[in-house]
Image (cartoon, helix red, strand yellow):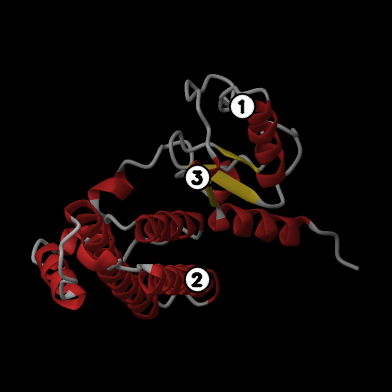
Amino acid sequence: MPGGSVISFNCVDSSLSSLKNCQSYINTGMDIATNVALDLVENCNDVEEVNSMESVMLEYAAMDRELNHYMQAVEATVHQIKQDKPENIPDLKDLVKKKFTALESKNDDSDLQRNEKYIHFMEQLKRMRKQFGLQSGTDANESIEQIDEDIAVTQSQMNFTCPITQVEMQKPVRNKVCGHTYEEEAILKIIQRREQQKKKACCPKIGCSHLDVKRSDLVPDEALKRAIDSQNKQTRPMP
């Protein structure tokens, strides 16, 4: 650039880091809302209150979408300036606003129902209702209907045994890809060992064709954990 002027993006990088922290707060809020909804189903089965938690999840999903769009707009602006190398420093705020507005203009309500945390919320809620013999207060969306049938079962039919350890699970996690459930520590050890061998980890469930289990595929199965805890309370001998 003439005169040796250089645009520093240190402040931008710092701001992006702060925004990512905000995103983690949103994720935490969605986890809390999920647990509250499961508590409601398990303890009082108040349909109206459970549905209100679904509304909370959609609000969080909207915040997450807006935050993602803003970060995308900032990153795209920085990339554009680094590529174009303009002689004069442009109005970064205006550029970001235009890109952000363009992204927001494509918003659709269905976007919120595709939020990964929202989908997980609906899956867990459906399983808890199934466990307690309840019907959903609202129609489940198409993605929820596609849940593998071997996990959408009643408590008496649930398999509480980890396919790796062959003992009852204490902290079950579900594979989003194939739908199978494992003890968290056991599956993570397999993934880590295979990574060290520079190989992919196969799903340890006999008969499963999923050949590349990743950490990012695993989500806590709170509904199954509650089912296990509930059965243990019922079978525990009276003092």
Q: Is residue 175 left or right of residue 236?
A: left
Judged from the image, the secondary structure of the residue bearing numbered disc 3 is helix
Q: Nearer the viewer, residue 27 or 186?
A: 27
Q: Which one is earlier in the sequence, the residue at label 2 or at label 3?
A: 2
Three-letter code for the amino acid on which mark 3 is drawn: Ser
Is residue 161 something one can see in this rendering? Answer: no
- Give the percent coordinates (x, y) of residue 150: 47, 36
Relative height, residue 116 to residue 69 (above, below): above
The residue under label 1 is 204
Distance from the alpha carbon under mark 2 to that under mark 3: 17 Å
Crowding around mark 3 (Cα neighbors within 10 Å: few <14, some 14 to 19, many 20+) is: few
**Mark 1 or 3, closer to the camera:** 3
The residue under label 3 is 216
Which image quadrant is residue 133 in? bottom left
Q: Is residue 82 left or right of residue 130?
A: left
Is residue 132 something one can see in this rendering? Answer: yes
Judged from the image, the secondary structure of the residue bearing numbered disc 1 is loop
Which image quadrant is residue 64 in? bottom left
Q: Nearer the viewer, residue 219 or 77?
A: 77
Crowding around mark 2 (Cα neighbors within 10 Å: few <14, some 14 to 19, many 20+) is: few
What residue is shown at x 85% (from left), y 60% (from top)? 237
Relative height, residue 145 to residue 74 (above, below): above
What residue is shown at x 38% (from left), y 75% (from top)? 53
- Give the percent coordinates (x, y) of residue 25: 47, 74
- Image quadrant in which the N terminus is located: bottom left
- Give the percent coordinates (x, y) of residue 16: 38, 69
- Give the percent coordinates (x, y) of residue 235: 76, 55
Three-letter code for the amino acid on which mark 1 is drawn: Pro
Three-letter code for the amino acid on which mark 2 is drawn: Thr
What number is the disc on residue 28? 2
What residue is shown at x 37% (from left), y 55% (from top)? 116
**Mark 2 or 1, closer to the camera:** 2
